[in-house]
Amino acid sequence: MTTEKPGLVQRVEAATPADRDRYLDLLRVAAILMVIVGHWVVRVVIAPEGRPEAGYLLVLEPQWRWASLIWQVMPLFFLVGGVLNLRSLRRALVAGATPAGWTRARVHRLLRPTCALLVILVPVWVAAELLAPEAMLLEIGVALIPLWFIAAYVALTALTPATLALHRRGWTLPAILGAVAVAGLLDLARFAGVGPVLGTQPAVSAPNFLLIWGAVYLLGHLWADGRLPARALGQAGLAAGGALALVAMIGAGGWPLSMVPIEGTELPNNAAPPTVALFALALVQTGLALLARGPVSRALRRPRVWTPVALLGSRMMTLFLWHQAVMVAVTNLLVALGWPPLTEMVDGRWWAQQPLWVALATLPLAALVPLVGRFEAPGPRAPRRDRGGWGAVLGAILLTGAGIAGLILLGVYEVSPWTALGALVLCIAGYWLVTGPKVTGPQAG
């Protein structure tokens, strides 16, 4: 007698823990997919007078900046991170883990796929800059833009033991209000042009990367304990309150419309650094996510609905880290081949071509995931969450943070490409520090 092998849907369903919050997985996957498609579409390639040129959609077509109110979905990722990391840390502490050990294991899982990307891209970037600086329409440095998220998320992950302590004492909401208030003051100083400029924006509001994203992360803590509105009226009120705040700030308060950086310009935006307007957008998204939770969660109980979410979620960081690299490679290759034919401007034909460009980038990204996706798993050298002190964790964060900052600034300032190798060394050193000696036994979850 032979037993039929279970199909993919059945295997995924059987492997899913009964207590897994499928809705949170969907929110993360949906956010990452929107980010990927948005990054691909805003990167414009046209051919005025027959010569290919790369541009940025929000610069060439500023009337589309309003769309960033819909397409800026990174607040959802930080929100969900605040829920899941709080729950994970609590479970780990009950199981006997140390806060430092849990943090070290979490940071390791973020840095492992990041360093895999950098070990490949940075040498290619340096070689291209030295050997053929004018050969590519899109520079490889564009592929490193997602690193800002890694730096911010690593920092918040490391702060989770402290935010859990705040949460236990009932100080989460005051902390959110305080962070937003300080960020608002820094916004005003930034828009007034106070202080020196870092990159394209006044540096005075740089702390908002931690304040605003931290406030959204803390909203996730409130979600984790059911302390956000539970009824539809309250959830709608949360979304409406955020929307009214956005209207007031953008319409009358002087905050910019764009929720993403306007690349190649010094125009203000609400994302780099983040502003209180971005936090208001996070309130809108949180309210809408709460409203949709019931019916969508019921749909996700169906194995065929859940399976694609689970599969994409298992390689979410790989998709996010590599999507820009694939876009750079595909764009340069297609332009060199002269296909598809480029338009002279952003017109109806350009928009009609966008599904094709997205498809042409999706196929190689899907092919790449099985090759590099294994780095998203903890690996044999993953540190155990029941061991470790804070020294290695803090050292790793400082080293990788400095390395990532250096790589991002290389895209802003004209410096020697050899500098990128120094930044790579810092990132690898941080990963090595957080990895430590090879261990055996249960891996971090």
Image (tube, rainbow, N blue to C red):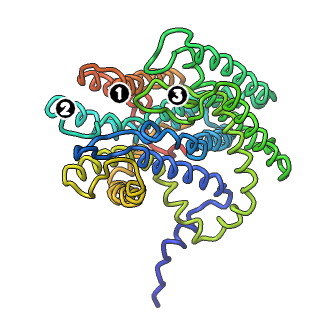
Query: Residue 280: which quarter of the image?
Result: top right
CB within 8 Å, label 1 to label 2: no
Kindly identify the residue that appears in the image at 73 percent across and 63 percent down. Answer: 295
The residue at the far bottom in this view is 1
Residue 92 visible in rendering: no
* Amino acid type of the residue that numbered disc 2 sits on in the rendered structure: Pro
Q: For numbered disc 1, what is the local secondary structure?
A: loop
Residue at left offset 29%, top offset 48%: 331
Q: Label 2: state its secondary structure.
A: loop
Toward the front, the furthest residue is 49
296 is higher (above) or lower (below) than 147: below
Question: For mark 3, what is the residue?
Answer: 272
At label 3, counting other C-alpha atoms closer than 10 Å, the crowd grade (few under 14, some 14-19, many 20 or more) is: some
Q: Residue furthest left?
A: 131
Residues at marks 1 and 3, CA–CA distance in whole angstroms: 14 Å
Residue 345 rendering spot, x and y as whole percentages: 35, 47
Q: Nearer the viewer, residue 345 or 229?
A: 345
In depth, the one of 165 and 54 nearer the eye is 54
Count of labels shown?
3
Lower sequence index among marks 1 and 2 = 2
Earlier residue among tags 2 and 3: 2
Residue 247 in percent (x, y) is at 71, 36
Residue at image position (60%, 53%) is: 25
The residue lying at 72 percent from left, 56 percent from top is 293
> Residue 125 location in percent, x, y?
25, 34
Q: Which mark is residue 411?
A: 1
Please state which amino acid type lies under the numbered disc 1. Answer: Gly
Q: What's the amino acid at mark 3?
A: Ala
Q: Are marks 1 and 3 in contact (CB under 8 Å)?
A: no
Mark 2, Cα crowd under 10 Å, few <14 / some 14-19 / many 20+, is few
**Tag 2 residue:** 133
Q: Position of residue 21 (x, y in %)?
A: 66, 55
